Amino acid sequence: MRKLSILLVILLVASLALTACGTDGTDTADTTKETQNVTVDTSKDYSKEKLVVWSFTDEFAVAGDVEYFEEMYTAPGKPFEGLEVEFVAVSIQDGYMDKILPALESGNGPDIFSGELDQIKLFIEAGYYGDIESMMENDPDVDLAAEKADYKEYIWQSGIDPATGKLAALSWQVTPGAIFFKTDMAAEVWGSEAGFPELGSADYNTAVTNWMNANKFNTIENLLTAQKEVKEFNSSWRLFSDDQAVRHFAAGTNNPSMWIDENGTLNPAKIKEQIPYINLVKEMYGETIGESLTANAAEWSGPWFDAMDKDLVDAEGNTWQVMAYSMPTWGLKYVLELNIEKVDAEGNTLAKPGEDADQAEKDAFDAAPFKGNWGMASGPNSYFWGGTYLGINADTKVPEVAFAFLKSMLFDKERLAARQQADGDMYSVESIMAPVIAQYDGRESLGGMNHLKVFNDEAAKIDLSNVTIYDRGLNDLLGVHITNYKQGAEGYNSVADTLKAFYADVQVTYPEIYVDGLPTE
């Protein structure tokens, strides 16, 4: 197998020492038979076998994926009767990569394991994922060409192993992002300029969103102008909670440069592309909210959540209001809608019950309608955030079982349709989403906007051909120096100082990609 030393993988080093590829474990011609279009190895007693599945999220258990697989494949009378399925969920925060990489390196990794995009790039480069495309080709129940055409192009392409040109990982999800914002606040700031329709009209949120897309959220420069205009309109209002909301727009284009150029070294064009973003963050920041263009409420902090449905209160007792948040597909359902305003029968805002409230009060709040005062805009460029990809361990001892699990997750269209109906998420499979989007009545929280169509359109704009295994590491590293610059740390007096400090760290952390003569302005 192509393997990376564990140290190189953890450091995201790309000077990969490739050795000869071994078998993917699927050659069982002498001992297999086809049962219900599932390859069964007659040399195995499946009641003594185990399928081990790892993920950085618990959704395989919560959504019933493991249970469904057991019902279809391991129950009495099924192809792998008696086989045990062990599911392990380890969050990113709890060290998913720190745990799975040593297991894979030692040859004791799980049979099936998930990853986000940059993680699967590492798994693929290291040779940890097997060739699922060949498995699809050899399965009479799977039409490879039809599946490829059915999946979003960027999702399919992101799972290709560049060494073989074959598919190694795939995701049923697509996770484009948006700027979600309070249309009533936007109307107060820009309504006289824009001539918005009457509040409460059927197309109100859409009209406000379209205008904001075209005039305030369409460029990095306009994002900065919009923040200033919000603050000028009302000194206690802010467009964004903090500058993390604009990190998704660092490129400012849907055709960004790669971090690594054709020579395998740090790309000067990518550095120059970051400079407007560095300047934007610097101008947004102030030590206090009063000095800042943002509310200085860090992502996932208590104040960040608070400002979604009510005033944010600072340490001095001052109140502030935030208009907009940058969130992906899952952010609407699992973050915003758990925190934004709801109303009673007269349209009055309901106070969110406290943790100590009785269950009846909590149930009444959960059942109340949303105020519907949020819009959904695109921003200067399309972006994605998150997504769960799935692949098979190239060294699995039960490849036929692992592929059956992958089939149940990715190619069982009845199951996918039922799963999507249950969670309302945005899927990467056109045959699943097309009828859902066409029949969708609109999202109550967004005043009836068809957010699925917006997300579908955004997903079509995403091109991951520029993604490298260095992206997360370099973005995080540059982020440290941008923070030092915006806060006025010693030695950080200019963009040039910031970039020089960044280059110094790159030279130490990723010496194989560093070159002299990189731009500083």
Image (cartoon, rainbow, N blue to C red):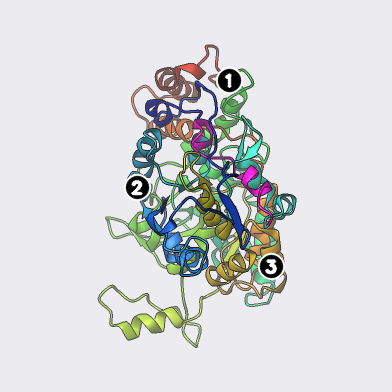
- At x 50% / y 59%, what residue is drawn? 331
Residue located farthest toward the top when viewing the structure as drawn: 516
Residue toward you, 209 or 464:
464
Disc sitting over residue 412 in the figure: none
Left or right, residue 293 beside residue 289: right
Q: In which quarter of the image is the C terminus?
A: top right
Magenta highlight range: 122-140
Kindly indicate the quadrant of the structure image that contains residue 62: bottom left
User: Magenta span has 234?
Assistant: no
* Element type at mark 3: helix
- Callout 1 environment at 10 Å: few (<14), some (14 to 19), or many (20+)? few
Residue 218: % across, % down: 66, 48
Residue 463: % across, % down: 66, 41
**Amino acid bearing label 2:** Gln
- Callout 3 environment at 10 Å: few (<14), some (14 to 19), or many (20+)? some
Distance from Cα at disc 2 to Cα at disc 1: 31 Å
**Amino acid bearing label 3:** Ile
- Callout 2 environment at 10 Å: few (<14), some (14 to 19), or many (20+)? few
Residue located farthest toward the bottom when viewing the structure as drawn: 345
- At x 71% / y 63%, what residue is drawn? 431
The residue under label 3 is 437
Vertical side of 108 occupied by 188: above or below: below
The residue under label 2 is 93
**Amino acid bearing label 1:** Gly
- At x 47% / y 30%, what residue is drawn? 474
Mark sitting earlier along the chain (3/1): 1
Mark sitting earlier along the chain (2/1): 2
Left or right, residue 275 beside residue 303: right
Mark sitting earlier along the chain (2/3): 2
Distance from Cα at disc 3 to Cα at disc 1: 42 Å
Vertical side of 507 occupied by 155: above or below: below
